[in-house]
Amino acid sequence: MRLAEKSGNNRHLIIMLHGTGGSAEDLFSIGNILDANATFVGIEGDVLENGMRRYFERYPDGSFNLESLTVETKKVAEVIKELISKYPDYRKTIIGYSNGANILTSIFKTYENLDLDNAILYHPSVTLEGQPVLAQKAAVLLTSGLNDPFITQEGFANLASEYRAANVDTSVFSHEAGHQLMHEELDASRQFLDL
C-alpha cells in the first residue's frame, strides 16, 4: 500500500483517504486548506478498477464486494494504526472522500476507539449495512450534497444516526450540489477542527 507524506511544522497529523480514481497525494490540496502546517500522510488504495485506484472492489452493478471490503478494511486499518503509533503526541485527524469515506466507515464499524481526535467523511455512503458503528474517541463530521447521486438524504441521515447511536460526537453538513467537494464544506471542516 503506497503512502505519500509531507512533513509539517506543527504537531497535527492529517491522514488522507482519496476517492475513486485518486492517489495518495490527491487530498493534499484539501489538507493545505484545513491546516497547511500539518503533517500529511495519504494512503493509496490497492484496488485497481478500470484504471482507477479504489480501496475495495465493486461488482459490475456498482454494489460493494463485501469480501473485498472486509479484507481491505483490515489492511487500511493496520496502516492507520501504524501511523497513529508513529505520531503518538500529535493531534490526529483523518479525512476521507467518497470511496475513502466509505472505507473509513467500514473501519469505524470494525475497530473500536481508534486513537484519533477528529474524522471528516466527505460524501460517504452506507457500508456494512446492518453492522453498527463502534464507540470512537474521534469527533466526526459527515458531509453530503443534497443532489448526490450516490446517497439519498434519508440514507445520509440514517448514517449520521448510526454514528450517534454509538455515542460518537457527530456533526453534519450538507450543500445544494452533488458529489463534488464545495468550498463551504471545507469552511465547515475548518470550523469543525477549530483551526
Image (cartoon, grey):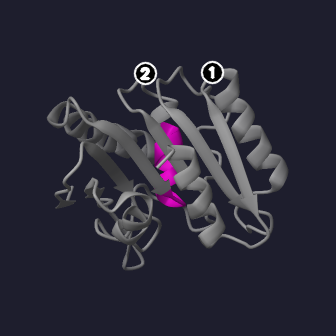
Which amino acid type is shown beneath numbered disc 2?
Answer: Asn
Is residue 102 located in the magenta-colored stretch of the structure?
yes
Choose top left, top right, bottom left or bottom right for residue 29: bottom left
Q: Tell me the magenta residue range.
A: 97-106
Image position of 155 (left or right of 131): right
| First along the sequence among labels 1 and 2 | 2
Asked if residue 90 is positioned above or below residue 64 in the image, the reply reads above
Asked if residue 119 is positioned above or below residue 60 in the image, the reply reads above
Judge by depth and name the residue closer to the eye, 22 or 93.
Answer: 93
Image label count: 2
Label 1 secondary element? loop
Which amino acid type is shown beneath numbered disc 1?
Answer: Ala
Image position of 32 (left or right of 9): right
Q: Residue at x 19, y 30 (%)?
A: 85
x then y, percent, for residue 58: 52, 60
Write down the residue under mark 2: 113
Choose top left, top right, bottom left or bottom right for residue 174: bottom right
Q: Residue at x 60, y 44 (%)?
A: 141
Q: CA distance from mark 1 to mark 2?
A: 11 Å
x then y, percent, for residue 142: 63, 47
Asked if residue 82 is positioned above or below residue 9 in the image, the reply reads above
Main secondary structure found in the magenta portion: helix
Image position of 142 (left or right of 109): right
Label 2 secondary element? loop
Write down the residue under mark 1: 166
x then y, percent, for residue 81: 26, 33
